[in-house]
Amino acid sequence: MGSKKAKTSKKPNKTLPTTLINNDNLKITFSYEYLDLSNSKYSLKSLNDTRIFNQFIDDYFCKLGEYCHKDNFKKALSDKSWKKHNHIHPIDWKDPQIREIGFTSLNEDLMEQIKDDCWQLGINNSTFRMHGFFIENIFYVVWLDPLHQLYHSK
């Protein structure tokens, strides 16, 4: 898959400040490069009710904005209270509560490389979650899980 450059009308006037290049201080960035839209279990297709769908969209973008404003997002992952409040935790694919063996839409080589940096990020306090993996400060969203189906109920 070749990379495409974004077209701009003119070149930026200056380069990024060095403080933005230091990965320890970068805010989270979301990528949908690996979003799996073919798996109806982990998508918005399971939301048949328009009211629930609209609530999910509102919750989703509100939470993304909140996450994007968090300084040192990856450092915050060591704050147990903050993680618990936001339903954030690593995904242990060997956990018997998990219904999958891994991100089935990813090729085996990529899954092998990222399997230890897969995470669940909460969208709201009820069921909405998203699952993906980190590479540095970029969170690659793989599954949207509006009905919290990745984990068996305890």
Image: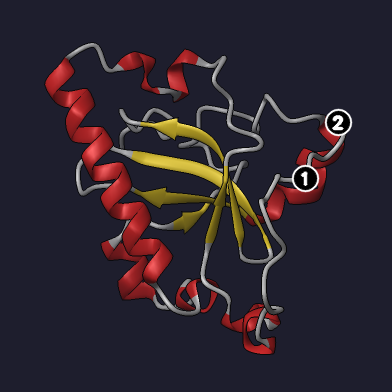
Give me the residue at 55% from left, 49% from top.
91
The answer to whether 21 appears left or right of 32 in the picture is right
Three-letter code, disc 1: Lys
Give me the residue at 31% from left, 46% from top.
61
The answer to whether 66 appears left or right of 8 in the picture is left
Give me the residue at 31% from left, 64% from top.
84
**x%, y% of residue 115?**
71, 47
Q: Secondary structure at mark 1?
A: loop
In front here: 94 or 86? Answer: 86
- Disc 2: which residue: 1
- Specify few, some or many for label 2: CA neighbours under 10 Å numbering under 14, 14-19, or 20 or more: few
Q: Is residue 88 above or below residue 32?
A: below
Q: Quadrant of the N terminus?
A: top right
The answer to whether 77 appears left or right of 123 in the picture is right
Q: CA distance from mark 2 to mark 1?
A: 13 Å
Query: Residue 37: which quarter of the image?
Result: top right
Q: Is residue 116 above or below residue 19?
A: above
**x%, y% of residue 38?**
57, 14
Q: Is residue 117 above or below residue 137?
A: above
User: Residue 71 got which mark?
Assistant: none
Three-letter code, disc 2: Met
- Specify few, some or many for label 1: CA neighbours under 10 Å numbering under 14, 14-19, or 20 or more: few
User: Residue 5 got which mark?
Assistant: 1
**x%, y% of residue 80?**
38, 74
Q: Quadrant of the C terminus?
A: top left
Give me the residue at 80% from left, 29% from top.
107
